[in-house]
Image (spheres, grey):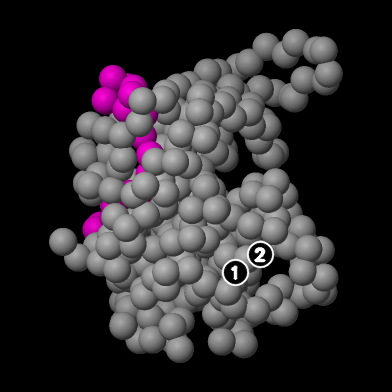
Amino acid sequence: MKRELLSFGSIVIDNVLVVKRFPSINETVLAEKYRYTYGGAGANVAVAAARLGVKSSLFAVSGRDFEKTNYKRHLKNEGVDTSGIIPSRCLMPRSFIVSKENSDDQVLYYYENKRETRKILFENIEKAYKLSSESEICHFSTGHFEFYYRLLKKKVKNVVSFDPGQETFNYPYRVVRILPFVHMLFMNNHEAKRLKEILKIRSIRQISGPKLVCVSLGAQGSIILFKGELFKIPAVKPSRVVDPTGAGDSHRAGFLSSLLKGYDVKTAGRIASVVASFTIEAEGAQTSLPNWEKVVRRYEHFFKEKFPSPQTTWERTKEELLS
């Protein structure tokens, strides 16, 4: 099977609490809403891309409750290829997300046995390499960066996309040593600031390695650097703001899916902004992901123009990224 997008990362059960304000130390705050949802950056990207019509796959370690929670059935129903999902005797990871409207999240993360997960990943590195060689884009999100580094050192031949997320703060040296293998780098503004501090540079233009750099700016949209050009992309207004969890993942999926469909970088950035706007309209990272038809309608409504036809080809963009 020829895969278009292979997503590396985690499969997580998200427990989302929506609050009016974050608690202070030793203070109790009543949550307005609670939702148990499917999440994990790797799975979020794979599902969002599949909704947009892309042949997406997921490489991740699951857990003994993968089928009991119906997560496996959910992925298959969404059209995600699950042949890269490796079973484990441990519970799937859990995240506990405290979300406040128009604010950043507070996140607690639980791993039953991270060492066991690492062991399973390294035992399956050849499988990961084979799947990556069959995929147009390999997207690496928050996960086991030592495994990513070992895999990428084997010279993954196709386009590599990287979204280090909070690991930019937790394990910055692991992020930095992956950068030489990356063609597209995604960050938010906080992560970009931290990366500049680590690399001792003044501008993201000075980051060596990636040919394309995209920085999300929340309600201010995003900026994209590619081939010496800077594109400023506005944030698309959602119908309502409920929960920002997973908006970054759906943005990446929208961007990569658009490139695969033959759109240029600027248009892909606009489409990604549209996709992300749907995610924050409901609790949970995968709850309100759009299909392509919904993206087209919202794009035309927001940008006040007819949805464009592809301006290039993926083959040409791929050549520019790999050159």
Q: Secondary structure at mark 1?
A: helix
In terms of secondary structure, what is the magenta stretch mainly? loop
Query: In the image, is 273 to the left or to the right of 62?
Result: right
Q: Are marks 2 and 1 in contact (CB under 8 Å)?
A: yes
Which quarter of the figure is the N terminus placed in? bottom left
Q: Is residue 223 visible?
A: yes
Could you tell whether 75 is left or right of 173 in the image? Answer: left
Residue drawn at (39%, 41%) of the image: 120
Q: Amino acid at mark 2?
A: Val
Residue 217 higher or lower than 323, as above or below = above
Residue 189 visible, this orientation: no
Distance from label 2 to label 1 (Cα)?
5 Å
Q: Position of residue 194 (x, y in %)?
A: 76, 58
The correct choice, above or below, for 241 with respect to 190 in the image is: above
Mark 1 surroundings: few (<14), some (14-19) or many (≥20) residues within 10 A? some
Left or right: residue 218 compared with residue 38: right
Q: Does the segment drawn in magenta span residue 52?
A: yes
Q: Report which residue position mark 1 lands on.
A: 179
Residue furthest to the left in view is 1
User: What secondary structure is marked by label 2?
Assistant: helix
Where does residue 275 sit, x and y in percent of width and height? 44, 54
Q: Quadrant of residue 188?
A: bottom right
Q: Amino acid at mark 1?
A: Leu
Identify residue for label 2: 176
Using the image, determine if residue 261 lies above or below residue 99: below
Q: Nearer the viewer, residue 156 or 260?
A: 156
Which of the pair 216/44 is nearer the observer?
44
The magenta span reads 50-70
Image position, residue 5 (x, y; %): 33, 61
Q: Is residue 228 magenta?
A: no
